[in-house]
């Protein structure tokens, strides 16, 4: 039985929220790891094994509330994925440009 | 007689600092206004007439410390300009992509 999280609709994404969420290197790392998982058509369950569950939850909440990721609770696990297409429609090229800068 | 501010060198720009600085709509507005002034080869002295001097000073400090703008005190005025070329070399396309999203 899945429990759902609350997510903003794409029209409610704000550039303030997206930039703030991505101004933290841990959160950019989570997004990069999720995107990497998504390549195989899967969502990533454990996007940051090295962090405590409460820290993971905190960062995922900020990413979720800004519209960057979508999470779904399935049993005891939270499955998250990046809302890349929706972000790109709203803010073209922004996510990848930021993530590219993260690697520099 | 000009008094100088302290500015980070381009190699010390951090993506965290740049994204945080630009996550505020007032600061993005200041940058846009300065870029607009720069079109004519001039720096803009009063980049946000509607704000109090202390608020202007606060936002300029954050922009300056992140490397986004350069300020110079000349007499009683502060002349600021955007360090666009340096930012672009360090984080290609980042500034304009963010400012483009600001307008949406």
Image: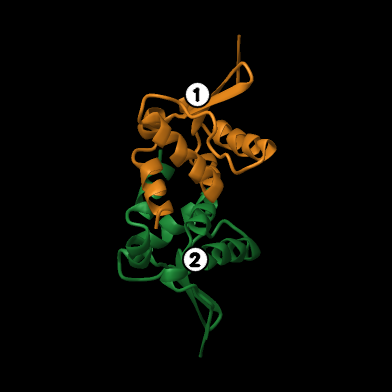
Chain colours: A orange, B green
Decide which of A99, B83 is in the foreground and name it.
A99
Q: Is residue A5 left or right of residue A37?
A: right
Residue B24 appears in view: no
What residue is at 47 percent from the left and 66 percent from the top? B67
Task: Say whether residue A54 is left or right of residue A37.
Answer: right
**Helix, strand or loop at mark 2:** loop
The count of marks equals 2
Which residue is at the far top? A1
Residue A43 location in percent, x, y?
Answer: 46, 26
State the residue in front, A73 or B18. A73
Residue A82 image position (x, y, % from top left): 45, 31
- The residue marked by circle 2 belongs to what chain? B
- The chain containing the residue under callout 1 comes to A
Which mark, by number, is residue A9? Answer: 1
Q: Residues within 10 Å of mark 2 (few under 14, many from 20)?
A: some
Residue B2 position within the rendered picture, expressed as x and y whole percent measured from the top left = 50, 86
Closest to the observer, A73 or B62: A73
Height in image: A3 above or below B43? above
From this viewpoint, which residue is outermost toward the right? A54
The percent position of residue A33, horizontal first and vertical second, equals: 46, 39
Residue position marked by numbered label 2 in the rendering: B46
């Amino acid at each position: 039985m899945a429990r759902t999280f609350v997510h903003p609709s794409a029209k409610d994404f704000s550039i303030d929220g997206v930039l703030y969420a991505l101004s933290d290197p841990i959160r950019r790392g989570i997004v990069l790891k999720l995107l990497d998982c998504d390549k195989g058509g899967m969502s990533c369950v454990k996007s940051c094994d090295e962090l405590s569950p409460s820290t993971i939850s905190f960062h995922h909440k900020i990413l979720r509330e800004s519209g960057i990721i979508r999470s779904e609770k399935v049993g005891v696990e939270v499955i998250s994925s990046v809302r890349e297409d929706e972000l790109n429609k709203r803010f073209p090229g922004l996510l990848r440009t930021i993530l590219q800068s993260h690697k520099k």
